[in-house]
Amino acid sequence: MNIHEYQAKELLRRYGVAVLDGGVATTPEEAQAIARTLPGPVCAVKAQIHAGGRGAGHFADDPSGKGGVRIARSAEEARAHAAAMLGHTLVTKQTGPAGKVVHRVYVEAGCDIARELYLSLLVDRASGRVAIVASAEGGMDIEEVAEKHPERILRVAVDPASGFSPFHARRLAFGLRLAGAQVGVFTAFVSALHRAFVELDCSIIEINPLVVTGAGEVVALDAKVAFDDNALFRHRDLEALRDETEMDPKEVEALRHDLNYVALDGEIGCMVNGAGLAMATMDIIKLYGSAPANFLDVGGSATRERVTAAFRIITSDPKVRAILVNIFGGIAKCDLIAEGIVAAAKELTLTVPLVVRLEGTNVAQGRRILAESGLKIIPADNLADAAEKVVRAVREAA
């Protein structure tokens, strides 16, 4: 789960991470009022969307080409910047050409920047440890730095058995050419960041740029935080930070029914139980010459209601030209799944071909329910047969 910059900074502030003063605004008037409360004549107005590259982006209806991070030298200028952003579509490298509508801006105090660095914490799947990554190339696209100048990327791994120690941060500090009191300040900063990462079950915390001020302070000028969805049951307060306006409406509906759904660009809707089986299903659809329109895992405890919700989500996608249901019944029995499929097909009045492959517990009963339903359901004997039939159905309907 992703959150906005202003939410990330508020969370990190609670752990002792140094951030600048600021406030979130949903109207130009609110932005102006916040700017008047900040110290100094200069402030930054930042569009809040779930995408990076805001400063280098552009607004679709703004010929000036100004991005989503702008400097204001008065409260009135902050108001003008907010008016130019709110309700408008910001296009960045990460949003794609469609962009994202800006619903709120963050008005933040100005900063005397002496240096810009890069710092992030993430789960390193290869080592099974939390990796702390740093670079002196702050404010830049870190992927580009890693590709062109890999030697400029510094990395340390934290052993989960022994935990974080100050030497982890000091090693990075020396690599970043910090000296004197800055080393201790940086070490305290990284320590606080690591504690937040572990206690909040984060999947990534990225500070880009991390700035060293003229006074030698270390401050998070930007903050990206994402949480492990599988751990959110331990953090009900964090779920309240979810911004559904940043999500595909189909994904929002899936969350409400505890379905794992990701929209894709293909034409065959998929409903599968189990993430591994879902990946295999998508792979074999590609193998037979088509492409999946989604990843949708109904899980092992699929019910009639959840199956109906899954069909409703799949059919709401106008790109879907056929549906493939691939169920291996273990915990979820095939007869119950079949009843859910029939009920959903009748309730939603499906207009696209439906191919169903059932295997596992009570498979004979499930296949009989489908056969006796009176619906035009195409049965499949195995996964390859299912993929071949659903791709053929799409081509015949073209």
Image (tube, helix red, strand yellow):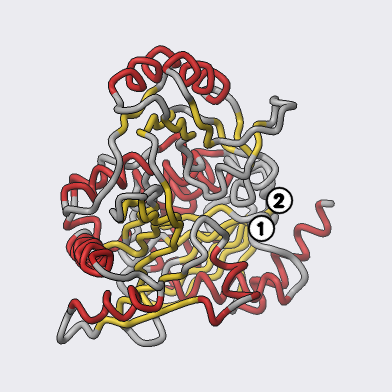
* Horizontal and vertical percent position of residue 227: 32, 58
**Relative image position of residue 131 (x, y in whole percent):** 35, 77
Relative to 157, residue 331 above or below: above
Mark 1 crowdedness (10 Å alpha carbons): few <14, some 14-19, many ≥20: many
Asked which quadrant contains residue 183, the reply is bottom left
Amino acid residing under circle 1: Ile
Q: Which residue is mark 2?
A: 321
Q: Is residue 40 visible?
A: yes
- Residue type at mark 2: give it: Arg
Dot 1 or dot 2, earlier in sequence: 1
Q: Position of residue 166 (x, y in %)?
A: 19, 77
Mark 1 vs mark 2, CA separation in Å? 6 Å
Name the residue located 53 percent from the left edge and 57 percent from the top edge: 372
Residue 164 visible somewhere in the drawing: no
Q: In the picture provided, is 214 more to the left or to the right than 354?
A: left
Could you say which is closer to the camera, residue 124 or residue 289? 124
- Residue 355 in percent (x, y) is at 62, 62
Q: Which mark is residue 268?
A: 1
Asked if residue 252 lies left or right of residue 86, the reply is left
Task: Tell me if mark 2 has few (under 14), some (14-19) or many (20+) residues whose alpha carbon lies within 10 angstroms of its own.
Answer: many
